[in-house]
Image (cartoon, rainbow, N blue to C red):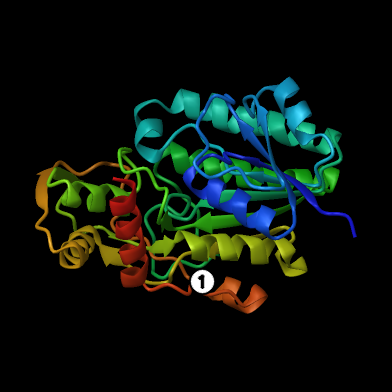
Amino acid sequence: MSKRSCLVTGGNGFIGSHLAQALATGGWNVRVLLRSQTSALRFASSEGISVVEGDFGNKEAAKRALEGVDTLFHFASTTLPATAYRNSIPDVTHNLVGTLNLLDEAVTQGCTRVVFPSSGGTVYGVPSHCPISESHLTQPICSHGIVKLAIENYLHLMSLEQNLHYTILRYANPYGPRQRSKKVQGAVAVFADRILREEPIEIWGDGAVVRDFVYIDDAIEATLLATSSVKSVNQVFNVGCGAGISLIELIAMIEELTERKAIVRFGPPRPFDVPINILSIEKAKAEFAWSPRHSLREGLLKTIEAILTAS
């Protein structure tokens, strides 16, 4: 039997790099699209993984990257909730319009399946109840969530018009090794790194906001199971741990595990931060028997170990 072939956009990112390696290990022919081949790969080059240079929104680059590919894992994004809030135009022009160009080329090249990582933390907006199921009203309060939701809707439209199958995974807050600790997103890596370095942590608001964190290996396992399941075709799934923790509680847990004291500075709350976000994962459990294997404590220990090893 011939190997399945796929393209992973964002394959050098935190989630995408883990995904590319897992797919190659699982026997896929994996192609990773990078903006520049001079970019240092965040993982050791593996058998079954090739690299193509280009921007996913560029039609010619997309054509080269998608040739001979049957599944597209579109994991590239150029904005975060905070950066999109300050300037939503690049979010729309690059992530939304660029994705539409990519999807159009995917259809032209004969790609039959798209797996898209949406944002379980932003597409729902302020929840009416928790845990939040996939049927919850989607009313995002930030550009990042609006664009993610728009891409979801376009995927549905293309499934009707062009028979392009999709699976949408609404991730909570993935964390773990390789998550960049110098970014504005990724509370676990940022908090752990700054506590270990005895550098201040900046909190917007009082730290009482509650978030759902899922360890990267669990998120990747859910992605692979969803990709291989016929029950996931043209479906949306939450991927989280089904429980929440406040940022202050998260800091306290990292303090306990590192035996270090955090330096916390509080600033004004951000208008795009919802007060609580906990995802229901019952649908993923029922449809493809997935549930996270790592507790938050176990995941934090592995993340802290990776930060210490890299430093």
Disc 1 crowd rating (10 Å Cα; few below 14, some 14-19, many 20+) is: many
- Residue 237 in sight from this viewpoint: no
The image position of residue 179, as x and y in percent, is 40, 47
Q: Secondary structure at mark 1?
A: loop
Quarter assignment of residue 182: top left
Residue at label 1? 281
Residue 63 picture location, percent across and down: 78, 27
Q: The residue under label 1 is which amino acid type?
A: Ile
Residue at (21%, 66%) from the top-left corner? Answer: 257
Quadrant placement of the C terminus: top left
Quarter of the image for residue 246 reads bottom left
* Residue at the image position 78 percent from the left and 37 percent from the top: 106
Expressed as whole percent of the image width and height from the top left, the position of residue 77 reads 52, 36
Q: How many marks?
A: 1
Q: Position of residue 96 (x, y in %)?
A: 59, 32
Does residue 175 sit above or below 232 in this rendering? Answer: above
Q: Residue at x 19, y 62 (%)?
A: 258
Q: Is residue 36 visible in the rendered structure shown here?
A: yes
Horizontal side of residue 142 vs 267, given as left or right: right
Q: Nearer the viewer, residue 168 or 186?
A: 186
